[in-house]
Amino acid sequence: MQQKPNGSDELRRGVGLAGVVSLGLGTAVGVSVFSVLSPATALAGPAMLISMLIAMVPMMVFGVVYSFMGAAAPVTGASFEWPRRFVHPLLGFMICWLRILGSTAAVIVLTLVLVSYLGTAVSLPLKPTMFAILILVLLLNLMGVSAAAFGQTLMLIILLATCAIFCFGSVPAIELDAFTPFFSEGYGGMLAAIPLLISLFLGIESATEIGGEVRNPSRNIPLGIALSVVLTAAIYFGVAVAALGVLGAAGLAASEAPLLDAAAASLGEWGKVLILVSATVAIGSSINATFIIMSRFLYAMARADMLPSFLAVVHKDSGVPRPAVLLAFGLCSLGLFMPNNLVFLFLAVNIPTILKYASTCLSSIMLVKKSPELYEASNFKPPRTVMLGFAVCGIALGLVIVVLGWTADWRPYALLAGWSVVGLGYHFLRNGHNSRRTH
């Protein structure tokens, strides 16, 4: 690519271990913990805690695969670059094409829930406030990935502090009787809650998407993912135990704002303020992390000549792919016209995410088999048979989760199918144009 007067196509390695962890936590610890505990408890009773632990298993499988891939082949726009490089360019394109829609839906659902939480304290116009949040995220990201990662780290510190205050402050109000009978809804109820709770852990691997901007990625990516899994599990489990112990299974299952109700019951009115701050920071960090990742896979697609090349230009001072960032902002702004149905939006987000996980698992299989030099050079490399077993297991788990989602709402599947057709048409038209231009 030709050098631009005010830009280049090289990103700056400005993200350390803290940034990797904060991006993972910032993506995973968002809207779900403030909304999913009630329906999960309604299904499983106190055994929801066991369901939560089991729900970690798929993310642990995907976490191992992503840790290996992030160490063996660190690159920005990883969910595009890995399947493109190790499986087939069309797979990489389609995964990211679906994620354009999925990431747009993710930003919209996060801003929607954030404004709803803020609306409990002060009356706010929905769409204008959502747009104002998008502008703030845009400005932060235009400053550079280091500034965006620092913002993530700062929000993470606030989130951990508020969750710790809630958990420890609720201890005197916890009733042991709230945990009995533990299997009140039977083992079937415990199993039924697992697919719902899987959404708690999606996104822990997010820092692999900026692998080209991570310092010492072969160390920081695997270690950062491991720390993210442990911290995320600790946050969720502590919050769930506190809420269940304070409200009881029946109260938690019936609550529309479980953490607000639990905090008010155990800490008084200022507890509501605490949870409101925690929710604002958690959801805000998820919006920022999702936006960073979205802009980076748009950049990666442009570098591979699958989107217009100007999207791959990096600003020489900030080290940011500003055209890709601006496009991400534009797409999210258009997303404000999407329906506000949360089930629809969550499925539009989760289906491309799960397909991304499955394609990364397939990419890891091909890397081990066809690029043994990368496997040998990796600082994190489980034995080949173990690595292949994790990858196959990840593909199977991903397909099961996608099939289960159909029973909730078929409409996001139809939307994603139509978006896929548009993407295939664009891809083949662009390739045909490029072929004629080169001949």
Image (cartoon, rainbow, N blue to C red):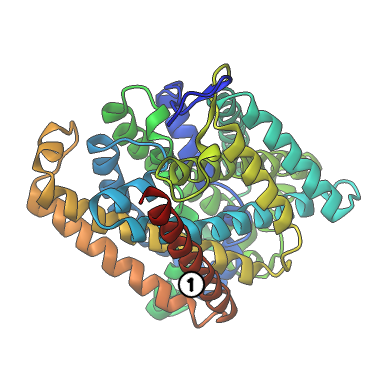
Residue 349: horizontal and vertical position, in percent?
54, 61
Residue 208: horizontal and vertical position, in percent?
38, 40
Q: Residue at x 54, y 39 (%)?
A: 311
The residue that label 1 is drawn on is 44
Q: Residue at x 22, y 37 (%)?
A: 72
- The answer to whether residue 289 is left or right of residue 118 is left
Residue 378: horizontal and vertical position, in percent?
17, 34
Is residue 154 shown above or below 246? above
Q: Is residue 259 visible?
A: no
- The answer to whether residue 68 is left or right of residue 164 is left
Quarter holding residue 270: top right
Q: Is residue 136 visible?
A: yes
Q: Nearer the viewer, residue 199 or 7?
A: 7
- Disc 1 marks a residue whose amino acid type is Ala
- The answer to whether residue 43 is left or right of residue 183 is right
Q: Nearer the viewer, residue 369 or 408?
A: 369
Residue 153: horizontal and vertical position, in percent?
55, 27
Quarter holding residue 396: bottom left
Q: Residue at x 10, y 52 (%)?
A: 369
Q: Nearer the viewer, residue 267 or 59?
A: 59
Mark 1, Cα crowd under 10 Å, few <14 / some 14-19 / many 20+, is many
Is residue 160 shown above or below 121? above
- The answer to whether residue 425 is left or right of residue 79 is right
At mark 1, the secondary structure is: helix
The residue most toward the front is 439
The residue most toward the top is 317
Is residue 418 shown above or below 327? below
Q: Quadrant of the N terminus?
A: top left
What is the tally of numbered marks visible in this picture?
1
